[in-house]
């Protein structure tokens, strides 16, 4: 859908403006914007963007009627749970939420079976989901069980006050001990399913890394994120010539097996929505990651 703003009577946020045009709920409208499905004058914007006269708004609407989400019994690795939050250790290969063509066997399906209380801010197909990690990335996620907790946690993510530490095994030997990658990320021009470092229709992205150990053909690194863009670590590491080992999408390197990339969300820390106390969680590297690491060490 393409819409040119005219006869604007007052300053209005883009989410409020689109709610009326699209006849959608606030949460669904905001999710469209958050997912990059709304462009204003060719650029991605935030929900707080104030609409201006003659703005050209383009909306790529998701066919939600093709998506269904239902509870499924799953063996979830619940690290912590109370009345407000669930901290889960996500395994390799588990998609976080349903999408068109993939309505079942996601973390959301398992969470819906596990708990009847999940936040509704992100709509009925993403209940409780405050942030995501890729299907073939393992590690810690925090899930909100009510809307207040969701908003409280989302604000920390937005203000970059959460602690998130990843461990990755990347191809090649990184000679310097630390580094920062500051490069904007947007959709790849030639493959819309991929992300890329680009100056067009992109958002700023910052990744810090530290070398933990060097091997003959690879490097084990620790990473901290200032931003949370889709595929950020995988895109950034490939951009500097050190793609994540076993990543099937980014970087043209051999796959050791088909168990997913060696990227693990190891640490997660945040202020609890109710107690207002800082909580931190740590998780061990999964067995598949360790197996590949051992293969690399022997080369």
Image (tube, grey):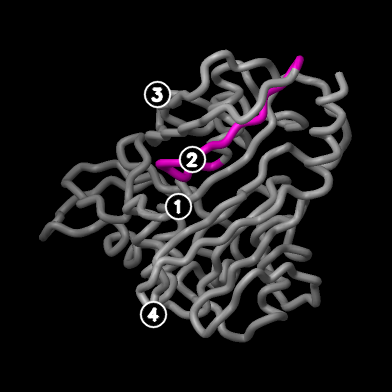
Q: Quadrant of residue 205?
A: top left
Answer with mark 4 or mark 1, whichever residue precedes in sequence. Answer: 1
Answer with mark 4 or mark 2, whichever residue precedes in sequence. Answer: 2
State the extent of the magenta-drawn residues as a range: 216-230
- The answer to which of 103 and 219 lies nearer the viewer is 219
Answer with mark 3 or mark 2, whichever residue precedes in sequence. Answer: 3
Residue corresponding to mark 1:
163
**Mark 3 closeness class: few <14, some 14–19, many ≥20 residues within 10 Å:** few
The mark lying in front, picked from 4 and 3, is 4
Q: CA distance from mark 3 to mark 2?
A: 23 Å
Tell me where residue 251 appears, x and y as whole percent.
69, 22
Q: In which quadrant will I find the C terminus? A: top right
Q: CA distance from mark 4 to mark 1?
A: 18 Å
Residue corresponding to mark 4:
274
**Looking at the picture, does residue 203 appear above or below residue 77?**
above
Whether residue 250 appears in this view of the structure is no
- The answer to which of 223 and 144 lies nearer the viewer is 223
Residue corresponding to mark 3:
199
**Mark 4 closeness class: few <14, some 14–19, many ≥20 residues within 10 Å:** few
Answer with mark 1 or mark 2, whichever residue precedes in sequence. Answer: 1
- Secondary structure at numbered mark 3: loop
Residue corresponding to mark 2:
224
Please say whether residue 220 is one of the residues in the magenta stretch: yes
């Amino acid at each position: 859908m393409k819409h040119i703003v005219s006869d604007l009577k007052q300053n209005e946020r883009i989410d409020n403006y689109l709610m009326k045009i699209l006849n959608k709920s606030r949460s669904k409208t905001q999710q469209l914007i958050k997912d990059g499905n709304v462009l204003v004058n060719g650029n991605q914007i935030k929900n707080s963007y104030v609409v201006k006269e003659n703005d050209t708004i383009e909306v790529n609407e998701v066919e939600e009627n093709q998506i269904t989400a239902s509870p499924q019994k799953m063996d979830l690795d619940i690290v912590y749970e109370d009345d407000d939050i669930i901290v889960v250790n996500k395994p390799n290969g588990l998609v976080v939420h349903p999408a068109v063509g993939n309505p079942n066997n996601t973390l959301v399906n398992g969470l819906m079976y596990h708990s009847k209380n999940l936040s509704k801010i992100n709509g009925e197909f993403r209940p409780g989901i405050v942030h995501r990690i890729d299907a073939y990335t393992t590690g810690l996620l925090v899930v909100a069980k009510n809307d207040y907790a969701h908003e409280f946690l989302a604000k920390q993510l937005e203000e970059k006050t959460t602690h998130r530490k990843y461990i990755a095994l990347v191809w090649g030997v990184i000679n310097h001990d630390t580094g920062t990658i500051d490069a904007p990320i947007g959709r790849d021009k030639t493959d819309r399913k991929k992300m890329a470092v680009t100056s067009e229709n992109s958002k700023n992205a910052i990744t810090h890394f530290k070398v933990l150990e060097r091997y003959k053909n690879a490097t084990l690194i620790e990473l901290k994120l200032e931003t949370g863009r889709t595929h950020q670590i995988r895109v950034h590491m490939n951009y500097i010539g050190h793609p994540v080992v076993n990543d099937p999408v980014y970087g043209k390197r051999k796959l050791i097996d088909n168990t997913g990339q060696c990227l693990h969300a190891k640490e997660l820390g945040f202020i609890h929505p109710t107690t207002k106390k800082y909580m931190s969680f740590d998780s061990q590297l999964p067995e598949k990651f360790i197996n590949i690491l051992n293969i690399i060490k022997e080369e």
